[in-house]
Image (cartoon, rainbow, N blue to C red):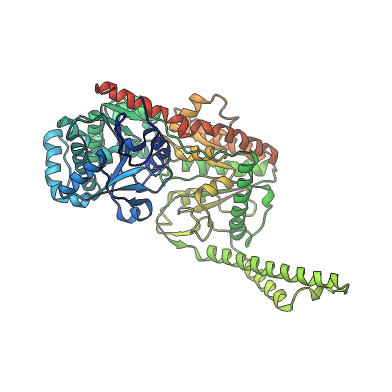
Amino acid sequence: MAVRRTRGDSNAPDEGPLLCEVAWEVCQQVGGIYTVIRSKAPSMVGLWGPRYLLVGPYNAEQAVAEFEELPVPDTRFGQAVRAMQAEGLTVYYGRWLVSGEPRVVLMDTRSAAPRLGATKYALWEHHDISLPGSDGLVDDVVAFGHMVERFFHHLLYQPAPAVIAHFHEWMAGSAIPELRRHNVPVSIVFTTHATMLGRYLAMNDPWFYDHVPFVDWLADARRFNIEPQVRLERAAAHGAHLFTTVSQITAFECQFLAGRKPDMLLPNGLNIERFVAMHEFQNLHRTYKEQIHDFVIGHFFPSYTFDLDRTLYFFSSGRYEYRNKGFDITIDALAQLNWRLRDAGLDRTIVFFLPTRRPCRSVIAEVLQSQAVMEEMRRTTEAIQEQIGQRLFMATVMNRPLRLDELVDEYWRLRLRRLRHGWRISRLPSIVTHELVDDAGDDVLNHVRARGLINRPEDAVKIVYHPDFISPSSPLFGMDYPQFVRGCHLGIFPSYYEPWGYTPEECVAMGVPSVTSDLAGFGSYVQQNFPDHDERGMFVVPRRMVPYQTTVDALTDVMFNIARMERRERIDLRNHVESSSPHFDWHNLIEHYGYAYSDVLRRTGRLG
């Protein structure tokens, strides 16, 4: 397919098909699809230029930071926007304030509310999709689907170059059934990043993948009260000219739960930051590790101390899905690692972090107080250091003898003594950093306590459960999540249900070793494309058709081997990880999208 490398709102004659990507997470972060669309945007803009447009719903709260409205241009896209506005629909044209600055059209679903009843009736009458009147998200999705359908009607009101509409997930794909019924001449690609039913079943069935071929999709959709979502998803999958997903493991699931085998796989990539010199990313690791040191000192050292030079930082993260994300496996493996390190007499401390969003009230007062006292101690010691330096310098240049007690004023000596007394506490460091709304019912917290990982001085493995996002505004870390990842030594993601899995891929992008599973899309991709993945710091533990304990033992082995490494070995491993990262850059993986678009144009007879 010929492409033109241009940008902006050029009015130059069309030199190929137009491409519209439609997604619920354009200019609003809800889940992983936001990362897919956002990180891919620079490559798509570079390839398609003014022929590329993103379409999403208008979210006023997030649009403030994500979206800049622009005058509607006199282009095919702009004309369609004006036509919708003339219908009385509220539509915004502008650019997404991310790298690549892709042009976007955002649709305010509230303006389609008067048409909601008729739209629902059409979906029921024409496609046997019954939609309740009490689900706010489903109503918004249906209204958005109607607006997207109207957009393509106006875009193709007269003969035009071929138009490709690429829909992501069921929330965006609700427009597909009516587009097909009205024979709108658009070439439709639908990508599911995970099936609705699969996510629910996996959380409730430990043998999900064995049972997938025998699932009664309608009965289970009704059992989980998600029938409208599942019907919309299946209609989108069957209505698309080209049906795609992100991994082999999800393709297997789609065949039975969506009722159609995907035609193609579109693996997810990232924008990989490359460094001129290898040591540059190692320097970043050291810098951010020292910031994590600050938190660890404030959290643990009031109770007891350990050698930070012999301390490694492991972490997991992601949406709080206790079994699906492998949090249960990880905790059991950490308990085994704790005993193995103690039995081996290995002088090593592992601090494991679990940042994941949970309902919580605030940071625990004692945790916040310890951090505050530590910062006050830092300011006091820095003031004392400055005073000592000044007085010692003046005494030296004046050749005057100076007694030790003259170096520091009594005020600072007493202040430091009071801070040292207030610093020490007799309790164990807290496992969790925040007051959870449901402390007694939290699966992670209960599992950690049941395995005896309660941050005792003799434990080699310490736990920090942080039920919130890590961000610069956090009073505990004060850093971005990517900076936190760079400062760690190992990411742990042994997922049971993970259609792709951005978290281990993000680790690779930042030169950090990581663990995934063979039931994760990313894990299966790594196994197929990197026979030496372990040597490259991309560890894949078995989960498919193996006992639970086998996975626990395999994860324990990986963590124990990392713990035994000396600094030089860990540096070498990070170098191997970093050297593999270009493979996952969108500049390399974007070609899969090109194949998909050529194929859908061929299928619809619009390949020029």
Does residue 437 sit above or below 155 in this rendering? Answer: below
Residue at the outermost front position: 12
x and y, in percent, of residue 354 in the image: 50, 49
The residue located at (56%, 53%) in the rendering is 454
Total marks in image: 0
Residue at position x 15%, y 38% in the image? 123
Residues 198 and 410: in front is: 410
Residue 23 % position (x, y): 31, 41
Would residue 566 be visible to someone looking at this image? no
Q: In the image as oriented, which residue stretches furthest toward the bottom?
A: 410
Residue 516, compared with residue 386, is above or below; it is above
Q: The N terminus lies in which quarter of the figure?
A: top left
Q: Position of residue 380 (x, y in %)?
A: 66, 70
Say which quarter of the image contains residue 194: top left
x%, y% of residue 416?
A: 69, 71
Judge from the rendering whether residue 602 lies leftward or rightward of residue 357; answer left or right.
left
Q: Quadrant of the C terminus?
A: top left
Nearest the eye: 350 or 151: 151
Left or right of 59, for residue 566: right
Quadrant of the image occupied by residue 41: top left
From where the camera sits, is residue 198 visible?
yes
Residue plotted at (65% across, 71% down):
419
Position of 531 relative to 117 (above/below): above
Pick the residue in front: 499 or 429.
499
